[in-house]
């Protein structure tokens, strides 16, 4: 289980406001939401140590069947375990030490009763057998489930993509963000004409003699269960090697065989991407398990050590520049964005879906950094500023805790804009880089809360960023820099902000728009003589996501 408690958090971090146990459900959510999103009594006493997943994929009727061995450690005494598996999937039986256990179903959760209560500190293992026709993903990867398609030659092309609905949409698991196994086996049986690519390293390929082949993969480090994937198709395979910070990293590529030549050109972008992100974030988190790009019948997803790729071998986002700046067409969006999640989301992971911004804000910001790595600071800045046109400000970025609620889509562009401003506020790229790399090393292979990451970034930067986080993550308000000009004196303050908001910002007179001067407004009026010309107006450096209002 990836848990972390940090000594530098000065104030003890309690359960976030709104967090509930299964005894109570927040307004607007169901009991099923609370069972899924909270650390209820049937979860809190045990810690997942290993998953041993075996699944047989049957394309003929779009069904799957299999078993998952769940090895656990009892953190305290307990007897009932919550195992999650969503309808219409069926849990057939649960076995421990050769004996079937009893269980009851409550929506998408199964409560399994051990024959004998587990003592605190003891270890055990149950095996959950399952089958069914998993939900078919209609808008993969967002809605989740299995994807049953064919390639352009009519060959079967199958994949999982279940970030939104979670791993329990197709296999029985403890579907709770704060608890991840220390390692996992993923053994997938498919028809002989298909290759299956899953997470980690390939350990064996077994011809079963009945028209099927079993592909056994092993993940040696913790993994988000929604990252566990099946990718079955007529794949080609080629390998590159990257001399990185932790040694030689294998970089394996699995395009459909019909796309191999194109993939050999497009996937060349992966090495400069890796070099850029290791510079900013530190070593790739999974040297033991390697890096893979795997073609998928959907746009893409951050499946750990097996990134799903479906961007049609085009630069941009399916050939479009989401920033409208031009810079986004110089590289493949899916390679860059999804690979950034190996650091932000897969290694350093939220422990509640409400803090999904930890994953997506940093992955979005990584696009900005990659544009800078490729074409310089001007490109990075213009890419990010252009991307802000996608911000909606309809609801806060942080969601409701305890109910598996992700919050708003502004976690991407608005969250990235916030991080870009923080770099400017720190005003020392070496220090900012140390903040990013330090977060990765401190929380490496761990789960954490948004509050813990916020506290760390303030501590590591030496700047209190708490109110900036609160403003941009928890409200939809855009800070307004109100100002007056009297003679050559500029008077200014922040408005439309949370209590106690203070953020430095770079400003200049409109008559000299590049002559930036840093000011440090608060919510109280302050004056700066000699900053303006009579009748001039004020402009704010475009990198800051704020508004201005002349009084």
Image (cartoon, rainbow, N blue to C red):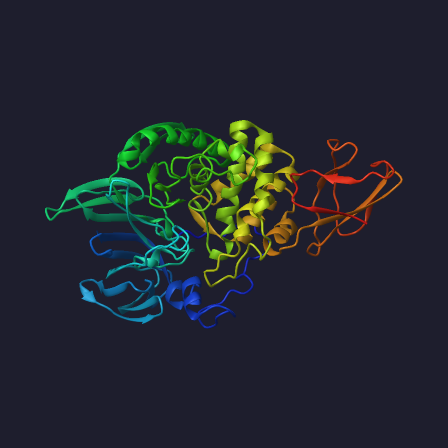
Q: Is residue 390 left or right of residue 3?
A: right
Which residue lies most toward the left here?
A: 209
- Label total for image: 0
Q: Is residue 8 visible to us here?
A: no
Q: Is residue 370 left or right of residue 159?
A: right
Q: Is residue 213 visible to us here?
A: yes
Q: Position of residue 190 (x, y in %)?
A: 20, 48
- The structure residue drawn at horizontal position 36% and vertical position 69%, both measured from the top left corner, is 107
Q: Which residue occupies the foreground of this view, 188 or 173?
A: 188
- The structure residue drawn at horizontal position 32% and vertical position 56%, both measured from the top left corner, is 136
Q: Position of residue 239 (x, y in %)?
A: 30, 30
Q: Position of residue 54 (x, y in %)?
A: 23, 52
Which residue lies most toward the right here?
A: 487
Q: Is residue 34 above or below residue 277?
A: below
Q: Is residue 272 above or below residue 20?
A: above
Q: Is residue 328 above or below residue 123?
A: above
Q: Position of residue 181 (x, y in %)?
A: 35, 52
């Amino acid at each position: 289980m990836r848990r972390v408690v940090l000594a530098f958090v000065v104030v003890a971090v309690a359960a976030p406001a709104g967090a509930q146990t299964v005894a109570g459900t927040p307004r607007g959510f169901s009991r099923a939401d609370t069972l899924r999103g909270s650390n209820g009594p049937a979860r809190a006493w045990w810690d997942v140590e290993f998953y041993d997943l075996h699944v047989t994929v049957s394309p003929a009727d779009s069904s799957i069947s299999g078993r998952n061995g769940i090895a656990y450690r009892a953190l305290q005494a307990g007897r009932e375990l919550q195992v999650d598996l969503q309808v219409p999937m069926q849990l057939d039986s649960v076995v421990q030490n050769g004996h079937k256990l009893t269980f009851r179903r409550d929506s998408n959760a199964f409560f399994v009763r051990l024959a004998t209560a587990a003592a605190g500190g003891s270890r055990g293992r149950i095996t959950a057998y399952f089958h069914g026709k998993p939900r078919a993903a209609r808008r993969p990867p967002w809605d989740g489930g299995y994807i049953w398609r064919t390639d352009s030659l009519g060959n079967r092309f199958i994949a999982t993509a279940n970030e939104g609905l979670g791993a329990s949409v197709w296999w029985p698991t403890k579907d709770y963000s704060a608890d991840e196994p220390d390692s996992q086996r993923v053994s997938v049986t498919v028809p002989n004409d298909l290759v299956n690519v899953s997470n980690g390293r390939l350990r064996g390929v077994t011809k079963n003699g009945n028209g099927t082949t079993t592909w056994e993969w092993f993940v040696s480090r913790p993994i988000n269960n929604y990252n566990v994937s099946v990718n079955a198709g007529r794949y080609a395979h080629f390998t590159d090697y990257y001399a990185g910070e932790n040694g030689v990293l294998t970089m394996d590529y699995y395009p459909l065989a019909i796309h191999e030549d194109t993939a050999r050109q497009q996937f060349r972008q992966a090495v400069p991407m890796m070099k850029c992100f290791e510079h900013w974030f530190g070593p790739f988190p999974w040297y033991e398990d390697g890096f893979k790009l795997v073609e998928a019948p959907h746009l893409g997803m951050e499946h750990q050590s097996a990134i799903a790729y479906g961007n049609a071998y085009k630069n941009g986002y399916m050939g479009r520049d989401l920033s409208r700046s031009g810079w986004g067409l110089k590289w493949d969006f899916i390679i860059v964005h999804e690979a950034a999640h190996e650091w932000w989301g897969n290694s350093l992971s939220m422990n509640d879906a409400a803090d999904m911004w930890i994953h997506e804000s940093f992955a979005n910001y990584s696009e900005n950094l990659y544009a800078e790595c490729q074409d310089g600071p001007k490109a990075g800045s213009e890419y990010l500023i252009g991307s802000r046109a996608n911000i909606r400000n309809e609801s806060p970025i942080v969601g409701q805790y305890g109910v598996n609620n992700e919050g708003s889509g502004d976690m991407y562009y608005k969250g990235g804009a916030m991080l870009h401003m923080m770099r400017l506020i720190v005003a020392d790229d070496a220090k900012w880089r140390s903040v990013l790399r330090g977060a990765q090393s401190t929380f490496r292979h761990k789960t954490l809360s948004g509050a813990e990451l916020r506290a760390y970034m303030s501590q590591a930067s030496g700047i209190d960023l708490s109110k900036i986080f609160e403003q941009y993550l928890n409200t939809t308000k855009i800070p307004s820099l109100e100002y007056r000009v009297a003679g050559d004196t500029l008077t200014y303050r922040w408005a439309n902000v949370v209590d106690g908001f203070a953020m430095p910002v770079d400003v200049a007179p409109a008559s000299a728009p590049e002559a930036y001067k840093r000011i440090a407004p608060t919510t109280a009026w302050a004056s700066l003589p000699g900053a303006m010309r009579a009748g001039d107006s004020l402009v704010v450096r475009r990198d800051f996501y704020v508004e201005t209002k002349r009084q």
